[in-house]
């Protein structure tokens, strides 16, 4: 994709974290550690789901797709960020910038859509437990995953197309990666369509997806409150706890990052950039940890792989893998 650009700009310069340029080498240490942990944790979950027949269920298939979207988001950001910190690789071509932007935002949209699918999974598990395997079969899980992927591609693909018509008179992006709004601010031509479409995507993804998730949890709570015993209520709520914590980690930083883009100088630049990176990396870092802690069957399989003991007792967990 070639951008028609009267200024002749062919590359952008990623500034990194404004105000903390002298600390980039030190900042590379926690980011490197995060990269290693993300690869190991998400890769470990994917390995377990792929190799353990008891985990090859629709629920774990959706979880594996969530891990894939987290890995795509991480690989789109961290390798180039670490090259920037270690080797001073500041420049990125316009094509490379648009490709990075597409994968970053597409993976975020896919992640959000998968969380909606997993909210539906939790609704069925709590409200229709006897029909769980009938309703949420492998075919439906595959269709939900394909719908999430299609939503990400179709919503984000217009962004580079709209950027294609712009003229860029600034080339230094005060960011660590090619965020859509950061690239839009480099243009000296009319950017209102880009800003409107970006806001439309945010409202559709965060607003509409959160609405669907909220409806699912209202129905879940209504069903839980009709249970007779306190143990049954706690058991049902615990079934949803991992998904609930992942929702908080995904959407709260996303909302803050979106707001800071629009309130400008009130937030220091380095705080905004760090928050934007955490918004992308926190789900990738904590999702496998949360699911590993809260889901008994994953804990059991992981412990068995680490300890290499074939004599561990059969896990008595639920058929859906919840604690």
Image: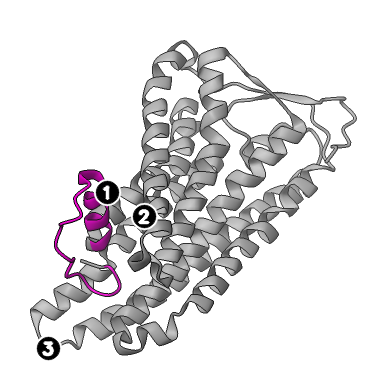
Say whether residue 173 is left or right of residue 303. Answer: right
Quadrant position of the N terminus in the picture? top right
Q: What stretch is highlighted in magenta?
A: 297-321
Proximity of marks 2 and 3: CB atoms separated by less than 8 Å: no
Mark closer to the chain start, 1 or 2: 2
Residue nearest the viewer, comparing 229 with 173: 229
Q: Which mark is residue 305?
A: 1
> In the rendered image, which residue does mark 3 sit on?
228
Element under disc 2: helix
Q: Nearer the viewer, mark 1 or mark 3?
A: 1
Residue nearest the viewer, comparing 292 with 77: 292
The correct choice, above or below, for 218 with respect to 73 in the image is: below
Location of residue 118 in the rendering, given as x and y in whole percent from the top left corner = 42, 68
Residue nearest the viewer, comparing 198 with 3: 3
Q: How crowded is mark 1: few (under 14 residues within 10 Å), some or many (20 or more)?
A: few
Q: State the residue at coordinates (52%, 64%).
A: 113
**Structural distance between the alpha carbons of marks 1 and 2:** 9 Å
Say whether residue 286 is left or right of residue 156. Answer: left
Q: State the residue at coordinates (19%, 50%).
A: 309
Q: Is residue 263 visible?
A: no
The correct choice, above or below, for 31 with respect to 69 in the image is: above
Location of residue 136 in the rendering, given as x and y in whole percent from the top left corner = 43, 80
Count how many numbered circles sit on residues in the image.
3
Q: Is residue 298 rendered magenta in the image?
A: yes
Proximity of marks 1 and 2: CB atoms separated by less than 8 Å: yes
Q: Which mark is residue 48?
A: 2
Q: Residues within 10 Å of mark 2 (few under 14, many from 20)?
A: some
């Amino acid at each position: 994709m070639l951008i028609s650009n009267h200024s002749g700009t062919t590359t952008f310069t990623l500034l990194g974290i404004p105000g903390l340029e002298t600390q980039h080498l030190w900042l590379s240490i926690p980011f490197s550690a995060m990269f290693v942990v993300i690869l190991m944790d998400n890769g470990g979950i994917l390995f377990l789901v792929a190799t353990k027949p008891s985990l090859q269920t629709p629920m774990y298939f959706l979880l594996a797709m969530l891990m894939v979207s987290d890995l795509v988001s991480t690989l789109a950001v961290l390798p180039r960020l670490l090259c920037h910190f270690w080797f001073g690789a500041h420049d990125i071509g316009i094509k490379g910038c648009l490709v990075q932007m597409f994968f970053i935002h597409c993976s975020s949209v896919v992640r959000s859509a998968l969380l909606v699918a997993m909210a539906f999974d939790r609704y069925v598990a709590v409200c229709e437990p006897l029909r769980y395997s009938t309703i949420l079969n492998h075919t439906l899980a595959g269709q939900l995953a394909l719908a999430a992927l299609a939503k990400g591609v179709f919503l984000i693909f217009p962004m580079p197309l709209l950027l294609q018509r712009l003229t860029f008179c600034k080339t230094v992006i005060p960011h660590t990666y090619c965020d859509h709004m950061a690239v839009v601010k480099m243009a000296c031509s009319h950017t209102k369509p880009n800003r409107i479409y970006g806001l439309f995507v945010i409202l559709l993804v965060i607003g509409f997806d959160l609405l669907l998730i909220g409806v699912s949890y209202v129905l879940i709570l209504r069903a839980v409150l009709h249970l007779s015993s306190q143990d049954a209520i706690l058991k049902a709520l615990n079934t949803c706890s991992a998904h609930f914590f992942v929702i908080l980690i995904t959407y709260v930083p996303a909302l803050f990052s979106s707001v800071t883009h629009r309130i400008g100088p009130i937030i220091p630049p380095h705080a905004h950039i760090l928050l934007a990176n955490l918004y992308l990396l926190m789900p990738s870092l904590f999702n496998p940890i949360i699911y590993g802690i809260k889901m008994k069957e994953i804990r059991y399989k992981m412990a068995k792989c680490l300890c290499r003991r074939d004599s561990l007792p059969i896990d008595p967990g639920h058929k859906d893998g919840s604690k």
